[in-house]
Amino acid sequence: MQMQAVTTERQSDGAEGDVVLKVENLSLDFRLRTQILHAVRDVSFELQRGKTLCLVGESGSGKSVTARALLHILDKNGAITSGRILLAGKSGDIDIATLTEHSPELLKIRGGRIGLIFQEPMSSLSPVHTIGSQIVEALRLHRRMDKKQARAETIELLRQVEIPNPDKMIDRYTFEFSGGMRQRAMIAMALAADPEILIADEPTTALDVTTQAEILDLIKRLQVSRGMAMLLITHDMGIVAEVADAVAVMRYGRIVEAGSADAIFHDARHPYTQRLLNSTVKLERNQRSDGRADPVLLAHQPVLSVRHLSKLYGASTSWFGGNAHAIKAVDDVSFDLYPGENLGIVGESGSGKTTLGRLILRTVEPTSGQVSYFGRGEPVDVTGLSKRQLKAFHRDVRLVFQDPFASLNPRMTVKEIVGDPLVVSGTMKGAALERRVAELLDLVGLDAMAMERYPHAFSGGQRQRIGIARALALDPKIIIADEATAALDVSIRAQILDLLLEIQQRLDLSFVFISHDISVVRYFCDRVAVMHRGKLVEMGTAEQICTDPQQPYTKSLISAVPNPDPRNKRMMHRTRFTA
Amino acid sequence: MIAHTFIEDAPETGPAVSALKTGKPIETDAAGPWRLMWTKFVRNKVAVVAGIIILMLYMIGLFAEFLAPTLPDTSRPQFTNAPPQEIRLFADQPDGSREFLLHVTGYTMTVDQASLRRSYVIDDNQVVPIGFFVQGAPYKLWGVFPSDTHLIGPLNPSDTMYLLGTDKLGRDLLSRLIHGTRISMSIGLIGVTISLILGVVLGSISGFYGGWIDLVIQRVIEVISSMPTIPLWLGLAAAIPLTWSPLTVYFVITLIVSLFGWTGLAREVRGRFFALRSEDFVTAARLDGSSERRLIFRHILPSLTSHILAVVTLALPTMIVAETALSFLGIGLKAPVVSWGVLLQDAQNVRTIANASWLLIWPSAAVVLTVLAYNFLGDGLRDAADPYES
C-alpha cells in the first residue's frame, strides 16, 4: 500500500498552528467471534480551525468508527491497535489514543473540546428531560455556570440554532420537537461547551431534504462564525460538495483518497472515488428523455387512472362524530399512468406518498375517490372490487418494498420466496416452477445457484433483486416501487435503477416510483408528481419539474437538493418555502 | 489546504479480516433456520448441559422398570426408615485378603425398648454382593414386555439394597423416585401439550384477526388469569370422586393444571402475531395472493415455532411444580401412583426430617434439578430462537 501525492497539487498553505487535531496512522480492530475485523487501517488526517473535513464512504467503510475513536466511544470488542490522535493544547499536544476510559482528561475533552452530533436526534436526546435541562447540564458540567447563568446561556444557544421562541421552547420535551428542531437542539447541546472541534456523524440522514438544507446551512454558518474545525461524516457526495473544504474517501477501513473538495470532485484519481462520483453524477441526468418517444403521447388510454382519491385518518370510526381532528393523509389526488410510463411521486416524509401507493393496491382502504385499471381491456373499478377480484388485480399490479431485509421471509429459500406467487396462484409447480424461478433470477442478474440459499446469505442490493424477481413472477403490468432504492448505498442504487429500466424495456411495464430522493426520480421517471401534505401540488415531465418548477413548494424542494459539484453550490442560495 | 493523495494499489473487494480460529468456517449460506438456531444454541454450554440432563430424566422415566432395583411398592416392614447404603468396591475375604467385590453393607437393627423405635446401623461385616443386569422382581416393561432383569441390584433377590434409603413402610426410595420421574416428567409434557394447543390456536386467532375477536379472547384470558389458582385447584381436585382409578385422576389433574396454564402462551403468541402481521414479508405474501390460512401457516407460524418452543420449555417446569404442589397437599395424585409430589408427602413432619432426612432431600433435589434444567434450557432456546437478529 502506498500513498501517492499528486504533484501538481499545491502543498499545505495553512499555518501550522491552525491544525487542531491530527490523526496519525490510526488503526482499529474489532474482535468478532471467529475473526478480527480491521475496521480502520492506517488512517491519517488533520482538522484545521474553521475548515470542514468530510469523511465520505458507503456503509461499513469505517467512517463512523473513526469518528467515535476520536472520543474513545467504542464498543467493548473494539480497540485502537496503533496510531496517535493528537489534540493541540496550550501546553503541548494530548494523545487521545493513550488516554484511559475514565481519565479526567478524556472526560474534559468529550463534549468540552470536541462536540458530537449524532444521526438520530430522537435517540440521542433523553425523552424524560426537557430540552433545556439537558443543555443546562452540559453547561454546568463543562463551563461551571450557576443555574441562572446556564439558563440564560441555553436560551442564547437555542437562539443561535434558530429555534423560534427559545425562552419558551427551553421547557419543552423532545417529543414536542420535529425532527429538524431536535437536530437543532442537539447542535445547541454540542455547542454548549464551546468546543474547538465539531464531529457530525450523518447529521441529516434522517431528515427531509429541505430540513437537511437548513441544518447544513446552520452548521456551516455556526462553524465559520465560531472558527471551529468540523469533521462531517456522510455517505452523500452531494452534501460533501456543498459543505466540504477537504474530503477523505474511505473504503473498507482505509482512506483511499484525500484532498481538497475541488481536487476530489474534478480530479479523482482512485477508481473507487471515480465510481462513487460517477454513480452520484449519473443520477443527475434523466435516463428516459433521450431518444424515446413520449409514452403519454403514444398511448390513447391510460393503464391506471386515479380520481379524487382521499384518505382520512381518525374521522369515520369515532363514536362521537368528531371530524375536527381528522388527518387528511391523501387529499383529492388525481393522475393517470400510461402504458410503458414511469411516473415518479416525490414528497417529504408525511406527504402521503406511501399511503397513496397503498391506496392504489387497497392494502389501505380509501375514504373516497376512484381507482380504475385498464390493463385487461375492460376498465376495472378497483375501489369496488371484492376480496377475490382484488387478487386478480394484485397479480397485475405489484409492489416492491423499501426494506430489502424485512420484505423477504427469512425462513424461506430464495426459490420459495420468488416462486410463492406462482404456487399460490396455482400456475406452476415442480420442474416448471424451478425453470421459471431460474429464469426470473437470471432476469434480475442473479445466478440460478442462489435458489437454494436463504435471504441472509445476500447483501442489501442482491436482496432487492430477489424482491424484484418476486414482483415480476406473475407477469405484471404495473409495478409500484415504494422507496425501492432508499435503503441502498449510492453505487448499488444506480445499479438497481438500471436493472429496473432494462426490465421495463423487455417486459413492457409501467412504474409508479415513490421516492423522497429527487435525483433518483429524475433519473428514472418520465413524469413526476410532487406531493405536499397529502395534496398533489405539481405534475410535469421530470425535466420540467427539476429544471423549471412552477409551484413555490416545488421550487424550494428542488433547490434544496445538494448538487454534487463544489464549483456550483446549489443549496446555499436556495429558495425557501413557508406555508 | 491538504495535499491531494490517494492509494495506488488496486481497489479491495471486501473488508479486511484475519481469522481467529483456524479450520473451516461454518457454511451458512444454504443453512436453514433450524441449522442456524442449532449453531447458536450449541454455543450456550449451560443450556446444552441442561438439555442433556432433561433428556436423561426422560430416559429414566421411559425405562423406569428396568432402571429401578425393585418394584416401587414392595415393602419390607423389617426395614422401615432405613438409611441409605453405600456402594463399596472391595470386600474382606474370609482368608483376610481384600478383593474386588461390588457390594453394599447390611444393617444391624436395634430396637429402643422405651420408644419401640427401630434404628439401623450400617454393619461393615455384612456383605451384600450386588451386580449389573441381575434377576430381580418380575415386571412388565410399559405394561407389555414381561422381564425380570434390573440394571443394578443384589445378586441374591432376597437380599436388600437401599441406595437412597427406605420410607416408613420399608419401600426402596430409589425405585420410587425413578418411577416418580416417569409420572412427574410426563404430567408436564401432557399438560403443556394441551396448553400449547389452546394457547396457539386462541393466540393466533386473537393476534391475526384483531378487532372484537381479540377483545373477547383477551378478556377471557384476563378473567382466567385473575383467578387464584391454589383454591381453584383445591376445589376442582376435591371434586374428583374417590372411586376413580388413579390413572383417571392422573389425567384429570393434568387437565386441571393445563386449563389454567395456556393463558401466558396465548398472550405470547398473540403479541408475536401482532408484530409479524405488519412485517413487510407478510404484506408481500398477502399481495402475492396468499389466503389467510396460507399466511398463518406458511408465513407467520414458522417464524413463531422457535419462540413457541422456548416458551413451552419455560412453561414445563411450572406444570411440574404445580403437580408437585397439588400432590404434596394431598389433593393431587394419590397412592399407589408415585410422583415426586406424592413422595414429598412423606416428608411433611419434622420427625421424618430429623430421622429420615433422605425422604425430603432426594425428591426435592429431583424437582429442583428438573426445574433449573428446564429454565436454563428454555433461556438458551429463547436466545437462539431468532437466528436472524443482529
Image (spheres, rainbow, N blue to C red):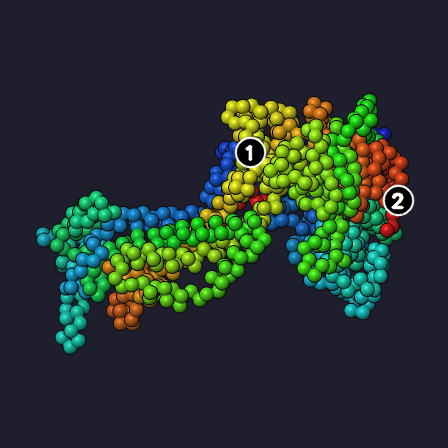
Tell whether A574 sits left or right of B178: right
Chain under callout 2: A
Task: Please report the residue visible at 61 percent of the width from the left and 26 percent of the height from the top.
Answer: A440
The amino acid sitting under disc 1 is Val
| Element marked by disc 2 | helix
Tell whether B326 sits left or right of A211: left
Percent of width and height locating residue A90:
80, 54
From the image, which quarter does the C terminus of chain B lie in? top right
Reply above or below: A354 against A501.
below
Task: Please report the residue visible at 77 percent of the width from the left and 54 percent of the height from the top.
Answer: A178
Task: Please report the residue visible at 49 percent of the width from the left and 45 percent of the height from the top.
Answer: B306
Which sits in the foreground, A304 or A230?
A304
Reply above or below: A392 against A162.
above
Residue beneath disc 1: A424
From the image, which quarter does the N terminus of chain B lie in? top right
Residue beneath disc 2: A552
The amino acid sitting under disc 2 is Pro
Crowd around label 1: few <14 · some 14–19 · many ≥20 (10 Å): some
Q: Closer to the observer: label 1 or label 2?
A: 1
- Same chain for labels 1 and 2? Say yes or no: yes
Single out the residue that lies furthest toward the left.
Answer: B95
Tell whether A115 sits left or right of B128: right
Chain under callout 1: A
Which sits in the foreground, A290 or B94?
A290
Reply above or below: A292 against A399.
above
Single out the residue that lies furthest toward the bottom.
Answer: B114
